[in-house]
Structure formats: C-alpha cells, structure tokens
Amino acid sequence: MPAWILITFASAFLQNLRSVLQKHLKGRMGTTGATFVRFGYGVPFALVYLAVLHYGLGRPLPVPDGAFAFWAVIGAFAQISATFLLVHLFSFRNFAVGTAYSRTEPAQAALIALVLFGETITVPTLMAILVSVLGVMLISVARTTLTLSALFTSVVSRTALIGLLSGLFFGISGIAYRSASLALEPSLPAPDSVMQASYTLVVVILVQTFAMLFWMLWRDRAELRRVGSAWKIGILVGFVGATASFGWFTAMTLQQVAVVKALAQVEMLFTFASSVFFFKEWINRLEVAGCVLIVAGVLLLLVV
C-alpha cells in the first residue's frame, strides 16, 4: 500500500482527535481562541519535528525561494479564510446546507489543479471523489427537513454560497501547500517529501500564529488571556494538530491534493465513532447511508 494512503488515514484520525479536544475548549473561549490554539500551541511541535529531521537524522534543510514563499503565504491565509467562513456558517439557521457545500473541497481542488497546473485525474478517481463528496453532503443535511428538490434550489442561497467559498479556500490552501512543498525539492540533494513537508509546516504555522496573534492583540486581548489559561489542553491540541498537519503536508507532497482530500473524508467515520462512544449521540439512517457512500468512495480510490 502506498505510503500516502497510510499517512492520510493516520492524519484523518489525528484530525478527528484534535476536533474532539477543541470541542471541549469551546465552552472556555470563543471561536477565534479555539482556532488559534491549534496553530499557536502547535508551533513548538512543528519546530521539534524539523529539528529531529535536521539535527537528529542529518537531513539537509531545503533552501526556500520566491515561489515557496508565495505559495506558503497563500496557503496560510487561504486556510484561515476557509476556517473563518466555515465557523461563520454556524450563525445561520440552516448552516448544515452550507457545511454540506463546503465539503465539495476535493472536487474544487481537482478543478483548481486542472486550471492552474494542468493536472489531470482519471475517470475512476473522479468518480470515487464524487461518491465520497456525496456521502459527506448527505451526512451534513441528514438532520434537517430538507427535501431533494429543496437541496437543489438552495444552491444559490447565502449559506450555500458561503459553504462553496469555504470549500474553495480549503481547496486553494491544499494546492498552495503542495506547490510550496514541491518548490523546495530542487534545493535538496535528493527528493525528501518528509523534510519538504516539515519545513513547509513550520513556515505556514508561524505565519498563521503571528497573523492570529496580531489580530487578537488588536481586537480581543481578553480572548488571548483565555487561550493562555487553557494551556494544559492547548498543548495536547497543539501536539495532535501539528502531527496531523505534518501528515497532511507529507501526503499532499506525494499525491495530488484532490485525491488526498477525497480519501481524507474517512475522517467522518472517525467523527461518528467519537459521537457514539464519547458524546453518546445517536445517528440516523441518512447518516449511515452517507457513511456507506464514504466507504465506497474510499474503496474505489484504493483499487483504481
């Protein structure tokens, strides 16, 4: 089995664990603070991973150029924008519809890669992406009274447009991270996807941390104090989040972003396991059907 598949599965599991931990933080701080925790507390671990690779294992550091800097900054702010829009959806009554459309990220990433870089995806792989995206969208609207016709007419609604825009920014961030990581390859004696991913992670997470830190110092210093008081769980969130990001960056260096993101939809299965076993929540038939579609899409990706 290719390394990127195993890395993607591990990253999806860790990302779900991070989400579970962040759910506990929501009662102690606002959305901005809970979002910052994943970046700010993740910085030390990202630096440790890079130090181990360079000083411990003797792997040479890449030499960044203008292309790397451009894509790293684009990816960092695209991810912040995507997360902000996704969180903003929760202020709408029918936020589930917008959330469903934000899950079109793999399909949008495939389109972006095709337009910007001429990357092509085989028909079976495209079918697998669409099946998994459909499964996630089905789960997202499973607890609403939305009918099939209403779902299609809601495409032009405000929440749907925000969701699509969120998915677009997530797609852009993934493409940008892959481009940044690959831009480092010529500066190394030999291709080293792990070092490229680690170096990219350090730069990106530092950009995101300083950007959000500046924002809170300017607009919400009380939130920053709440972030500091939650340092115990914050360290755990930072460790899990940085490790998951390290995995995502490595997988996206090895494989097309759309394919990695489609396989990453398996995170929804981990989410349901967490909901049932940790939060004692129930799931309905539509959610089960969505899980089946996600599994089908993942299996298609593994066999094509």
Image: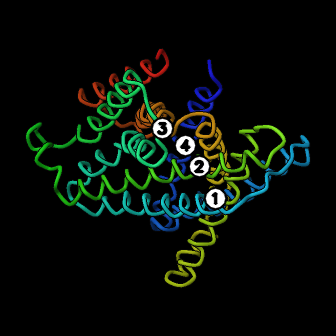
The residue pinned by badge 2 equals: 179
The N terminus sits in image quarter: top right
State the residue at coordinates (16%, 54%). 156
Q: Do residues under tags 1 and 3 come within 8 Å of each other at their CB atoms?
A: no
Give the label on residue 15, or none. 4
Q: CA distance from mark 2 to mark 3?
A: 12 Å
Few, some or many residues within 10 Å of mark 2 (<14, 14–19, 20+): many
The disc label shown at residue 119, or none: 3
Residue 112: x percent and y percent? 41, 47
**Separation of disc 2 and disc 4 at Cα?**
22 Å
Which residue, given by chain and number where applicable, does mark 1 sit on? 67
Which residue appears at 37% of the width and 20% of the height? Answer: 296
Amino acid type shown at disc 1: Ala
Residue 66 percent coordinates (x, y): 67, 63
Q: Amino acid at mark 4?
A: Gln
**Disc 1 to disc 3, C-alpha distance:** 18 Å
Among all residues in the image, which is located at the extreme top? Answer: 303
Mark positioned earlier in the residue sequence (1 or 2): 1
Of the numbered discs 4 and 1, the one sitting upstream in the chain is 4
Q: Are marks 1 and 2 in contact (CB under 8 Å)?
A: yes
